[in-house]
Amino acid sequence: MIHSATKYIDGQGRCLAGAVLGNEAIIEQVSAFTRATGPSLSAFNAWIVLKGLDTLSLRMKAHCDNALKLATWLQDQDQVEKVHYLGLESHQDHALANVQQSGFGGIVSFEVKGGREAAFKIINATEILSITANLGDTKTTITHPASTTHGRLTDDEKQQANITEGLIRISVGLEDVGDVINDISKGL
């Protein structure tokens, strides 16, 4: 398993890092590659990642709580067609996630009526949210997947991945969720 430590583990967007987890055979394959190519963290960045682990459980609880509040609010908005968040009972996999997980994560996606134009109106109206495709930071970020993270896909590939022109993705941070809601409401 390859995991990005840049995201929630560091949690502050301070460094680029990753971790490879697995049995001895997997680790040996990766070790051979790293010995030949040299990618490794500096001691300082390793320390930053380790410091991030100290508060990971507290931060994840806050990310999850804020994301659920935002998702609940979004599903009541007339301009929102659909909210994608496992923490909502309306999500098709909510019951399974409730059994398998202790929280539902900090990522909320939602589709707005009016496609790309309406999505851009919301994103461009925000003032405190960062417009970026980055995830897992203490600050809330917002992005339009169809034109950023999934922008190179064909229309057919986007359709298969359920990436619509009205889809907005938010990585909910640790700010007061009321401020996040107020910021999003400016464009709705």
Image: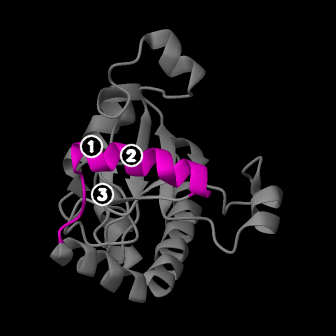
- Specify whether residue 68 is in view: yes
Depth check, mark 3 against mark 1: the one in front is: 1
Q: Is residue 27 left or right of residue 125?
A: right
Q: Which residue is mark 3?
A: 141
Nearest the viewer among 99 and 122 is 99
According to the image, label 1 marks what residue? 36
Q: CA distance from mark 3 to mark 1?
A: 36 Å
**How far across and how far down the image is residue 116, in percent?**
34, 27
Give the answer, above or below, for where 113 lies relative to 45: above
Identity of the amino acid at label 2? Ala
Magenta segment main secondary structure:
helix
| Sooner in the amino-acid sequence: mark 2 or mark 3 | 2
In this view, the residue in front, 166 or 41, is 41
State the residue at coordinates (26%, 39%): 121
Residue at 36% across / 77% down in the picture?
Answer: 174
Q: Residues within 10 Å of mark 1 (few under 14, many from 20)?
A: few
- Is 108 or 33 nearer to us in this picture? 33
Q: Amino acid at mark 1?
A: Ala
Q: Is residue 27 left or right of residue 5?
A: right
Q: For this view, does 17 lie left or right of residue 95?
A: left
Q: Which residues are magenta?
A: 22-42
Q: Secondary structure at mark 3?
A: strand
The reply to whether the C-beta atoms of the residues labelled 2 and 1 are less than 8 Å apart is yes
N-term-proximal mark, 3 vs 1: 1
Q: CA distance from mark 2 to mark 3?
A: 36 Å
Q: Residue tagged by mark 2?
A: 32
Instruction: Please name the residue shown 19% across and 69% down the image.
Output: 14
Q: Residues within 10 Å of mark 3 (few under 14, many from 20)?
A: many
Q: Is residue 133 visible?
A: no
